Amino acid sequence: MPRDDDPRTDRLFASPARNIEDFAFDADTASVFDDMLDCSVPFYGKIQRMVGELAGDFGADGTTTYDLGCSTANTMLAVAHHLPPGLDVKFVGIDASEEMLDKTRTKVASMGFPYAFELRPDDLDTDLSIENASVVVMSLTMQFVRPLHREQLLEQIYRGLNRNGCFILIEKILGHHSVFNRLYIRHYYELKKRRGYSDLEIAQKREALENILVPYRREENVRLMRDVGFSQIDTFFQWYNFLGLIGLKSTEAADSDLSA
């Protein structure tokens, strides 16, 4: 089905370009980002619901929920919807893109938000402060953090989490074996075509993301989480090369579930 001409429809890569610039979270991207997520991320709505439900299980009175790479506030809204009524919780949304934060402000103002919140334009590669957190979410964000900075970022997240707080990570990943990885990517591109993207759009976006989005294998993400202190880690979602992990900061001894 062809993509329509609504200004909110993702057509960023629909026209042939001689030189493909690196993907950027600028005003053009922000204006179509919700459509991009809906059409590019498998089961995006269900993932948001699952993140909201899990965050609702761990959100605690008098604490803070962080959304790192909050983009247009979809995750913040999903989490807010699933928190127990009457909970005294503050939200902090962090995104290095001011254009994304502008979209967040507009959406939150139009839809209403029942909790105190703060938006910060921090760079996750260099600048992050987390404290008194019961929930920290990174939804399709870690893959854009430079690999050399990921362990340090996770250390900051772990230190800022309260005991029994949770870290929720959604990532695009690499398959463990190249033969499966090729199959997963092929099926992913087929899904994008079913949702209206052309071969040209898929190819040009892939090139734009080549040096920007750096996926890890599942085992690498789990190992990073274990190395900074998460002892209980589980998979709560997977579709081919998309993965959802949850880690718990606990003082109780427990084995990581590496087979999940």
Image: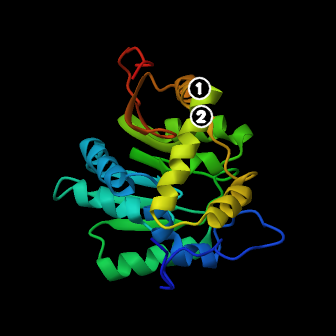
What is the x, y in percent for residue 59?
29, 47
Decide if residue 132 is in sight here. no
CB-based contact (under 8 Å), mark 1 and mark 2: yes
- Marker disc for residue 176: 1
In screen coordinates, is 63 left or right of 207?
A: left
Q: Which of disc 2 and disc 1 is earlier in sequence?
A: 1
- Residue nearer the viewer, 180 or 157: 180
- Residue nearer the viewer, 67 or 188: 188
Up-down: is 12 above or below 135?
below
Give the colour scheme shown: rainbow
Which residue shows up at 56% across the image and 37% down it? Answer: 183
* Distance CA(mark 1)–CA(mark 2): 7 Å
- Marker disc for residue 216: none
Of tags 1 and 2, the one toward the viewer is 2
Binning the other alpha carbons within 10 Å of mark 2 as few (below 14), some (14 to 19) or many (20 upward) gives some
Decide if residue 36 is in sight here. yes
Based on the displayed image, in which of its 4 quarters is residue 17 positioned?
Answer: bottom right
Which residue shows up at 18% across the image and 53% down it? Answer: 84
Element carrying mark 1: loop
Based on the displayed image, in which of its 4 quarters is residue 228 positioned?
Answer: top right
| Three-letter code, disc 2 | Asn
Binning the other alpha carbons within 10 Å of mark 1 as few (below 14), some (14 to 19) or many (20 upward) gives few
In screen coordinates, is 150 left or right of 100?
A: right
| Three-letter code, disc 1 | His
